[in-house]
Structures are given as structure tokens and as C-alpha cells.
Image (cartoon, coloured by chain):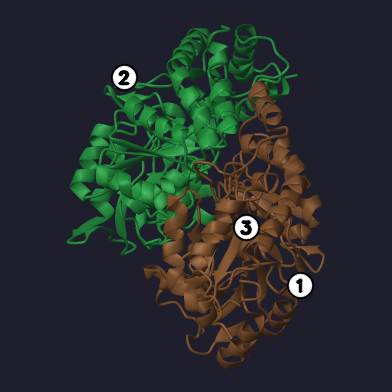
Chain colours: A brown, B green
Amino acid sequence: MLPEQPQAEPITQILAALRRFLPEKPSLPLHEPSFAGREWEYVKECLDTGWVSSVGKFVDHFEQQLADYTGVKRAVAVVNGTAALHVCLRLVGVEQNDEVLMPTLTFIATANAVSYCGAIPHFVDSEEATLGLAPDRLADYLSDIAEMRPQGCFNKRTGRRIKAVVPMHAFGHPVDLDPLLEVCGRYRLELVEDAAESLGSYYKGRHTGNWGKVSALSFNGNKVITTGGGGAILTNDEELGRFAKHLTTTAKVPHKWLFVHDQIGYNYRLPNLNAALGCAQMEELPGFLAAKRKLAESYRTNFAGIKGVRFFTEPEFAQSNYWLNVLLLEPQYAGQRDALLTATNDLGIMTRPAWTLMHKLTMFADCPRMDLGVAESLESRLINIPSSAVLGNAV
Amino acid sequence: MLPEQPQAEPITQILAALRRFLPEKPSLPLHEPSFAGREWEYVKECLDTGWVSSVGKFVDHFEQQLADYTGVKRAVAVVNGTAALHVCLRLVGVEQNDEVLMPTLTFIATANAVSYCGAIPHFVDSEEATLGLAPDRLADYLSDIAEMRPQGCFNKRTGRRIKAVVPMHAFGHPVDLDPLLEVCGRYRLELVEDAAESLGSYYKGRHTGNWGKVSALSFNGNKVITTGGGGAILTNDEELGRFAKHLTTTAKVPHKWLFVHDQIGYNYRLPNLNAALGCAQMEELPGFLAAKRKLAESYRTNFAGIKGVRFFTEPEFAQSNYWLNVLLLEPQYAGQRDALLTATNDLGIMTRPAWTLMHKLTMFADCPRMDLGVAESLESRLINIPSSAVLGNAV
């Protein structure tokens, strides 16, 4: 019997697949926006009417589009996803010195928003099935460290209250929310969804961001839809929705001319100019999502035969927006991640690794955390590859 | 109908003057933007190229225009004036529990920014000559309450450090900065200029915002120029300028693909889309300022003969942008302020009073303060009248 022909190294095969499969261009961004709809019409209307700033019909319309699309009762447009997260945490009552559970595998905004409240991020591990927070392992961990008191859940080790948990739907793939909701119920934790990356993603048929008490969206330039910079707060609690609007508009009490503010609020209003862009982008969202699914499906088939790497597909309970497509190297090839990043970027095919894990950053190094082995493994093996909607129509 | 009492005389005459003098329109806003320059061209370029978000050539160009215009070494564009103030205070080292001196007669942003740092606003009175912070009375007050220690200036009454002073150039009229700088030197206070309203205003020939260690501008929809929402940090300290850029771009360490952040930063970047608007507006700024001076001069002559009211003109050491024109009722007519506000707004001539003084708001009621008699008098008598640049070309 002949010895099995050794396959080429995964990195060589991955590069070959990307070059064969992606359109030949001097540069392929990770995620570029597309403005092929009514963007110019709406933006021009802002300029023609002079309504470019913090109030205007596009802000109202964009908020309604977001509420209708995600199925929540109220959406409040804000200046970016970080601002949305910050206000979400204030809305559920996160206070100075509280701890907030969140994945270590996330973008910096999740941890920064916790810090803005004077609260402390408490890092949770991820699971490979979703790339997001691992509810079962969190439950085990809390059974060790948590103590229930009349005022809520307390960390026995630090003595601090644990007020909320903020799952982040990484790269658009939904976290397993049902077991997480069970944990929230058991430990009286508020659920705040960081849905910054998951507009167009559904968990068991209901939109992400429609599960938490409040949730945050982002419309940064690299997201599924963009407003230049922008974000939104989602909630099914109409009272909280009104309060979100109040807090994000400097907590000004409505009056024809008097300037009275009834608490410390924020200037987090999304300008009408940016909302105009958002209104046009929302009209295109179904098309973007269809193109992105087509792209993901092509990636899946093109990478199917390559040993040592897996193209990440949506969990079985989810429909994902495939915001940023993910390649996962098998653990034995983790050492080749940087070579692959270098080779692809040198070819003009933009790729990047996961964000540096939060607990590895200087300012969060001393924050409480559970064992983070899965997140550490994922970080060492994960690569994002070009994911623009426009590519879905080209492949 | 207004009762024909002798006291009603100024208000009747003011109304008559406004109706005679202002163009007849169903509604005259307090300050509306004008987009008669290259706004369309630049904004469309963003859409056509896809560069709408947090980096792009318009951001760089807008920052350079601002630096050139104000004469500072570095301008950093941010998402609004509140964000600019917040970062300015961080840049000069304001920390939790510090006190920050600021006028009580200001917009809420000044006090909120102090609160975001965990610091405490300490309210200072204004002077009628500038409508801004009164340096001489502040000096007298500090000689009572301040104690110099190796760590800086301390409030003897509260035991807290007083770290900075934030004059605000109210309605565009420059504060008397020379005596204030003298006070800052004597008490080792950092000077942060809140120049949100004073783009185009000069103190003794040098632009406002070019006097403090750092300064904040705003480009909200009602300002002299607008980016929809936007602001900027100005500084002559290049090191601080670089740090401002770093802090406002999530404190991300530059790298081709790694996401490492070296401290808690902010997502305060101005989108390229908004900066594009700003670039076009900056080209029009000289025209706006000329038209606004023409309008102010017409107001001055039209109100010159009316007893009981004074049209506020720039202090002798200043050239003001006349952002929002100001009528000051004489103290004996203060009681008619609200009747004048009602009558003008009912006619579609938008007017408004000064902001409610900061120390009168619930959340700042317990903050330390000096005697605020002048600010209280000004608040009771001050009315802003329509001030759009476009009116200057119509009168």
C-alpha cells in the first residue's frame, strides 16, 4: 500500500482557494459599504432642507425602521455602538463598583462601556459552537463564586454586586440565548445584548437584540449597514425606551424655550444627516443579507475539502448575518495564523485576527475572570476574511 | 394683546422693531445653517467612494482647516462638543473628586463633561461686559477659599483639589482671558476654553480656543458652521494633540491588523461624512461671519433708540462672531422677559432665554459656588434673537 500523499500545508491551500475564488482586485477590504440605493436622495434632502442635525424626520423614520425590522417596541438612534452600550448599562441600573459579566472575546467597546459606568468587567469564556459567551460554563462558574442576597447577585470573592451580563454576538453569530436567559433568571442578572455586529441575525426565529432587557446596535462603516458612525438602543420596555431617548438627548425636559435638564445625560443623538443614510441602507438590508449568505455559502464549499481549517457556519438554532466570515485553523496549525495574515494582506486580501482578548489588555488585566481557555484557543486560530455584500454578487 | 401700561413700553417697541426689521416669513429660526457652498460635492464624494466612516480624507482636511483657521498646532475632530470637552478635561488631568471652576451661565455640556470625569463643577459668576466668567471676582473668591499645596490648588471648604477652570465664550463673545490667565498662573489651574460657540471670535487678535492648554469647539446644527453633529479639540501642545487623537479613537495602538488598546479610550471619531460637510462649511465661514456682523450692526442701530433694552455688542478687546444675538432688558423690565418670549415666538420669530443656570438644576444644586448674583440677573433679563447668517444678507 502506498503511503498517503501528504496534502499541502493548510496555509498554502487556503491562499490558493482565496485567490481562485475571490474577484481579482488590487485590494479587497474586509467589509466595505455599498450605497446603491436611495442614499444620495435622502442625504441631499437633508442638505436642501437644512435639517442635518440632531432632530429631523430621518431620525424618526430610521428608529421606526429599526423597531419594525427587529420586532422591538422602541429603537433609539445614537451616535455609535459604544454610546448605545453605555446607555444600555445605565438603563438596567449598572452602578459604580458593580461587576458586569461579558465575554473576553469581544471588541473593546463592550468593556469600555462598562468602565464608563465606573463598573468592572468580569470576563467569561466563549464556546466554539457560537464564538460567543458559553452559558453552561458560566452557570458552573457562578455556582462557585456567586452568592444571592436581597440586593441581588454578589461575587463572593470580591464582595461586589454582579448586576448584568452582556453577551456579544461575535461576527454576527448569535449566542445561545435560552440557557443564558435561564442563568440570568436564576442569578437575577439583567441581560444586555451587545448586538453591534448582528443586525439581520436571528436566534430561534427572533431577532438578536430582541431578547435582552435592552440591546445595542452599531452602524459603523464596516457593519452590515452604515450611517458613517451610528448605533441604536433597542427595547421592548416602552418606559425604558422613553428614558433612553431622554438620557441620550442631554436629559432636557421638553419646553418651547426653557433649557432645563433633570439629570446628568448625554449628547448621544444621531444627526439627521447620518440617519438619512441609515434609512436608505435599511431599505437595502435584505439584499445585503442575501448577498452575504451567498458569499458565506461559496466560502463554505470552497474551504470544505481543505484539511486543517474550518469555515465557521451559523449554529443550528440561528440564522446569521455572516457579518465577518471566520476561518478557524485547527489547533495544531495555530502557529501559522500570523503567516496567513501576512500572506493574505500582502496580496491585498484584507484579513485580520480576532480582537486581542480583553483580559490581556493592560487596563483590564486585573479584572475578575473565569478560566478563559476556549477564548484563548479561538483567538490563536481565528481569521476574518473579506465579507462585503458586494462580493456575494461577484462569486 | 399686551396691556398698554408704561412698563410695557420696551417690549412693544422691541416687537415693533423686530417686525419692521426682520424679513417677513412664517417662521424665523434662531440660527439656521446654510449649505450654499461645496457641501453637496464633498458629501457626494463620500458616498461615491464609500468613505463615509471614521477615517477618510475629509477628516484630515477638516482638522487642518480648523488648525489653520484658529492658529493652533493641532485640531482633532470629534463627534460633538460635549465629547470634545470631556476629552479636554481628561487631557489636562482632571480626576475623580477634583473640582473644576466653570460659569453657572453656560450650556449643560460644560457641567456634564466635568461629571463624566467624576469631578465636581464649581460655579463662578459672570460679568455683564462679556456675559462670561468674571476673572476679577474669581480672583477675590479664590483668595478666600483656595489653599496652595504641593499637589496644587485646594478648596479649603471641601478639601478637594481644584484642577482647572473652563471659561465659556457665551453666545460667541470672548471672555476676558488676560486676567483669567493671571489667575490660572497664580493658582496653578489648567485653562480649558469652552469655545463651542466662538468659532470666528478673537480675543485681542488671537482666536478663542488658542489660549487654553486645550479647547473645545462645537459644530452642532445651530452653530456658526455645522457638520450635523460634531466638535473638535484644539491645542498648541503637539504631544497632547497626538494623545487627544489616540484617546478619541478608542486608544488603539496602530497596527496593520492587531487590535490592542493601551488604555480606556473613547469612540469619539467624527465620521468622514460629517467632516465633508465641515470642509465645505469652513470655506464659507468668512462669508457667514461677515453676514452675521452685518446683522448685528443692523440690530444695534434698530435697537439703539429703545429705552429699557440694550443690544449686546462685543467687548472692546474682542472681535465676536455674534453667534446668537443678545438683547438685555434693563433690570426693572426683567419681569417682562417671558411676555417678550411668548409674543415673539407666537409671531414665528424664534427667541429664547439664557440656559437655566447650572446651579439651579437638581443634579448640580449641591455643587460648590461663589455668589452668582450677576449671572442670576443676566439670566432674568437675557433674550436671544434670530441670528442666522442668511438674515445678514436680507437686512
Q: Provide the chain ID for the residue under circle 2.
A: B
- The residue located at (37%, 56%) in the rendering is B253
Going by the numbered disc 3, the residue's amino acid type is Ala
**Front residue of this view, candidates B2 and A14:** A14
Q: Tell me residue B11's x, y (percent).
A: 61, 18
Going by the numbered disc 1, the residue's amino acid type is Glu
Q: Provide the chain ID for the residue under circle 3.
A: A
Relative vertical location of residue A348 with respect to residue B287 in this rendering, above or below: below
User: Which comes before the other along the chain, label 1 or label 3?
Assistant: 3
Going by the numbered disc 2, the residue's amino acid type is Glu
- The residue located at (41%, 30%) in the rendering is B61
As measured in the structure, the alpha-carbon distance from the residue carrying label 2 to the one carrying label 3 is 52 Å
Mark 2, mark 3: which one is toward the viewer? 3
For this view, does A394 lie left or right of residue B318? right
Which image quadrant for residue A282?
top right
Can the viewer see residue A321 in this picture?
no
As measured in the structure, the alpha-carbon distance from the residue carrying label 1 to the one carrying label 3 is 21 Å
Q: Which mark is residue B316?
A: 2
